[in-house]
Image: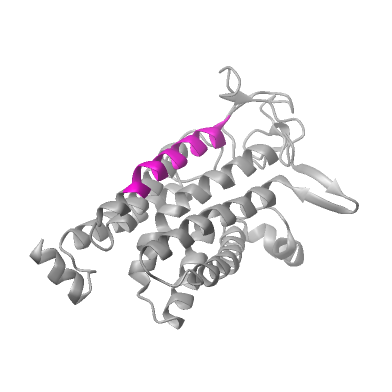
């Protein structure tokens, strides 16, 4: 594991932060080119990315605090300023709300921008999971006898196996190989992005890419949670899985509405009827 990639004097470059920056730059480039392809102002990409970054960090921190409320009450300042504990779904909610606000300010339709942006979240999520894999921040599965790289030992991780809340007292050591669930998520999310993104070139109805992205993200996370070391809050289900169920249902609803051109502008509806 390499939680700190390198240092520049007193400045430390953390693996997760570095991959988060890569994710924003990469997704921003895809988004900017798609805006140009659609005849929109590519400068909109900068406003959306900045809103997503700020809203995402705030949302992720608030979700993390809600999940660990007792720990936050014991150390509020540490809970707010800690560099760990950012939760993806909280970031997705916060980022979405901030992006809607930024898009409306520029006179654009949020549904059309969401249709462009949401599939890119799959790519960004994959980049983020590479950061998790490098940092060893507790997002792995349980002890496993699978060969490398399907299972890896993480002695230098931010959260070593013997200190993970789910493994304390189980006899697991810092060198015990754990199921490399971040790797599975990198492959799954990037593969789903590669499947959805080219569909934009075939002029799908507004909302279709958004719905597909929502369903893909929800399904990927729901499945992987069964083998990740996360707390079960309702029978065998984790909080992320419950959120995934809601996200998948919302994605199906969006796909249904998109199939009936409910999100199209009047001009788009007329073009769809003529074709």
Above/below status of 140 relative to 40? above
Magenta stretch secondary structure, dominant: helix
Above/below status of 118 relative to 50? above
Q: Residue 7: horizontal and vertical position, in percent?
A: 84, 47
Residue 259, image quadrant: bottom left
Is residue 63 shown left or right of residue 266?
right
Along the line of sight, the residue nearer the viewer: 233 or 77: 77
| Res 231 visible | no
Above/below status of 62 relative to 7? below
What quarter of the picture does the N terminus occupy?
top right
Residue 79, image quadrant: bottom right
Residue 188 shown in magenta: yes
Q: Residue 247: horizontal and vertical position, in percent?
A: 36, 55
**Which residue is at the far left?**
274
Q: Residue 139: horizontal and vertical position, in percent?
A: 59, 40
Q: Which residues are magenta?
A: 180-198
Residue at 60 percent of width and 40 percent of height:
130
What quarter of the picture does the C terminus occupy?
bottom left
């Amino acid at each position: 594991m390499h939680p700190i990639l390198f240092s520049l004097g007193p400045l430390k470059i953390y693996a997760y932060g570095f991959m988060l920056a890569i994710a924003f730059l990469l997704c921003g480039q895809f988004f900017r080119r798609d805006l140009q392809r659609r005849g929109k102002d590519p400068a909109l990409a900068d406003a959306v990315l900045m809103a997503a970054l700020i809203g995402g960090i705030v949302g992720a921190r608030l979700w993390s605090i809600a999940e660990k409320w007792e720990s936050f009450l014991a150390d509020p300042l540490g809970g707010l300023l800690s560099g760990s504990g950012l939760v993806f779904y909280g970031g997705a909610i916060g980022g979405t709300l901030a992006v809607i606000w930024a898009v409306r300010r520029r006179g654009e339709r949020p549904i059309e921008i969401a249709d462009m942006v949401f599939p890119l979240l799959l790519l960004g999520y994959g980049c983020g999971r590479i950061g998790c894999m490098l940092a060893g921040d507790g997002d792995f599965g349980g002890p496993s006898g699978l060969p490398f790289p399907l299972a890896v030992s993480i002695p230098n991780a931010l959260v070593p196996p013997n200190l993970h809340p789910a493994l304390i007292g189980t006899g697991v050591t810092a060198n015990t190989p754990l199921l490399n669930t971040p790797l599975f998520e990198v492959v799954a999310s990037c593969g789903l992005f590669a499947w959805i993104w080219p569909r934009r070139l075939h002029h799908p109805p507004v909302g279709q890419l958004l719905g597909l992205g929502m369903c893909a993200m929800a399904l990927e996370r729901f499945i992987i949670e069964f083998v990740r070391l996360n707390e079960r809050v309702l029978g065998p289900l984790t909080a992320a899985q419950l959120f995934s169920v809601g996200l998948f249902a919302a994605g199906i609803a969006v796909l249904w509405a998109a199939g009936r051109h409910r999100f199209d502008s009047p001009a788009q509806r007329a073009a769809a009827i003529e074709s």
